[in-house]
Amino acid sequence: MNKVSLRLYLAGSAHDATIGLDKLKRFCTEKARAAYEYELEIINVLENPQLAFQEGIIATPTLVRVSPPPQRLILGDLADRDTLLSMLQK
């Protein structure tokens, strides 16, 4: 099984942030779990702006595939399952 490390940058508990997180968790549970072992780290940029700045995050939500390389990003809406699936694949 392939292991994928993801990091999701959100701005607080805003409605859009909550929806994005719910969509991502649902996708990972329903679609990705069968083929991928994944780790999801959630970063609140309002609580940790320095980390977001260091990582070059300028918009939320931003999903980053940390590993395996190469790093990939999705900015904004996390509803497109094809885009999420392509992010998981090498």
Image: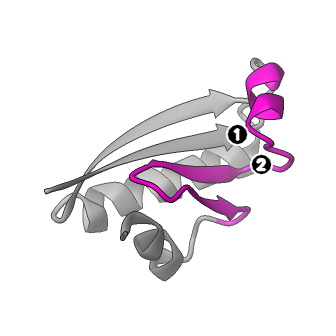
Picture quadrant where residue 78 is located: bottom right
* Tag 2 and tag 1, C-beta contact below 8 Å: yes
Percent position of residue 68, x then y? 39, 52
Quick one: which residue is furthest to the front in this view? 69
Q: Quadrant of the C terminus?
A: bottom left
Residue closest to the eye, 89 or 60: 89
Q: Rounded to the nearest whole Å, what is the CA distance between mark 2 and mark 1?
A: 5 Å
Label total for image: 2
**Is residue 7 covered in magenta?**
no
Among the two numbered marks 2 and 1 on one chain, the one whose residue lies closer to the N terminus: 1
Percent position of residue 65, x then y? 50, 52
Q: At x 51% / y 51%, what residue is drawn?
A: 22
Numbered range of the magenta stretch: 49-77
Q: At x 34% / y 57%, what residue is drawn?
A: 28
Residue type at numbered disc 2: Thr
Helix or strand or loop: what does disc 1 sit on?
Answer: strand
Q: Quadrant of the N terminus?
A: bottom left
Q: At x 79% / y 43%, what residue is drawn?
A: 57
Horizontally, residue 54 falls left or right of residue 41, namely right
Percent position of residue 30, x then y? 27, 64
Q: At x 60% / y 52%, what residue is drawn?
A: 63
- 14 above or below 24? above
Percent position of residue 55, x then y? 73, 37
Report which residue position mark 1 lands on: 10
Horizontally, residue 80 falls left or right of residue 77, namely left
Label disc, if present, on residue 41 of the rendered structure:
none
Report which residue position mark 2 lands on: 60
Residue type at numbered disc 1: Leu
